[in-house]
Amino acid sequence: MKVRVIGNGNITSNNFNASFLINDKILVDAPPGMLKELKKLNKNLDEIKVIVITHLHGDHYFDLPFIILNEYARGRKEKLIIVGPKELKKKLDILTKLAFNNRLNKYIANLNIFFLDANTVQNNQVDNDFYLSSIKLVHGEVKSNYGYIFKQGEKALGITGDTEMCPGLTYMLKKVDLILIDVNDKKGKHLDLNNFKDLVKTYQTNYIPVHFPDEIEEELLKLKNVKIIYPGEEFYI
Ligand SMILES: [Zn+2]
Ligand SMILES: [Zn+2]
């Protein structure tokens, strides 16, 4: 499985916000500016088959209206599946109205887009031997908040989105070979550095912290089984 880190930052960090491209086909989260990041990669956007959204905080999905507009403008024919919280379509409609005084439905009606409630996604086949599952994670008061497990052959990749310590997270850590994990270092709504250190000691897997503030980068680099992958880098698991 090929993973490209488009961003690994949080709102305050210098790096682009946490977002990833799996096997060139599945985009995970769409922070503000994502469309331009994809254009910088010189990507044929028809290759992107699925967009997966972790939760409805602006730093994770506010570029979706622009991606949809772009696809409408260039006359996309390929099917596009958008997986996310069930409130996503309604929120997008509001966002698009705010941005352009126009209705999203006009664009969607002309595109082959399907919205899929993340809650229903369990071992859904995305590609030949590629499967997607959602895991409910806790993130402050956010009602619909999901991490995802991507499976291909024997390998499993976890992406948490934003999370605090919760049973869904420990479930993920036991299942995956590698995890891209939120270490925003804010008490309560995210993992802080101490939470993260405890997890690294307790659960044996490979950790790539993301969504972290620049100030804790040095501390993160000292930990065993922890690697930082920077925006623009790719790796395989
Ligand atoms: Zn969040
Ligand atoms: Zn966030």
Image (cartoon, helix red, strand yellow):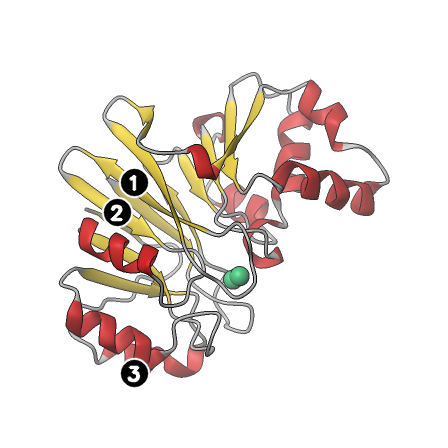
Residue sitting at the far front: 167
Q: Secondary structure at mark 3?
A: helix
Q: Secondary structure at mark 2?
A: strand
**Mark 2 → mark 1, Cα distance in angstroms:** 5 Å
Say left or right for 223 vs 101.
left
Establish if 57 lies above or below 129.
below
Look at label 1 and name its amino acid: Phe
Query: Of residues 181 and 164, which is closer to you in this image?
Result: 164
Query: Of residues 32 and 125, which is closer to you in this image?
Result: 125
Query: Badge 1 is on which residue?
Result: 150
Q: Position of residue 25 (x, y in %)?
A: 39, 33
Q: Earlier in the sequence, mark 3 or mark 1?
A: 1
Tell me if I can see residue 155 in this picture.
yes
Picture residue at 58% right of the left edge, 49% below the top: 61
Look at label 2 and name its amino acid: Leu
For label 1, count other residues whose C-alpha is less than 10 Å away and answer few (under 14), some (14-19) or many (20+): many
Mark whose residue sits in front, 2 or 3? 2
Q: Is mark 1 within 8 Å of ligand 2?
A: no
Say left or right for 228 vs 212.
left
Tell me if I can see residue 176 in this picture.
no
Q: Position of residue 40 (x, y in %)?
A: 51, 46
**Mark 3 → mark 1, Cα distance in angstroms:** 28 Å
Say left or right for 155 vs 180.
left
Establish if 34 lies above or below 200.
above
Q: Earlier in the sequence, mark 2 or mark 3?
A: 2
Picture residue at 20% right of the left edge, 71% below the top: 200
Query: Badge 3 is on which residue?
Result: 219
Query: Of residues 78 and 129, which is closer to you in this image?
Result: 129
Establish if 166 lies above or below 159.
below
On residue 157, the disc is 2
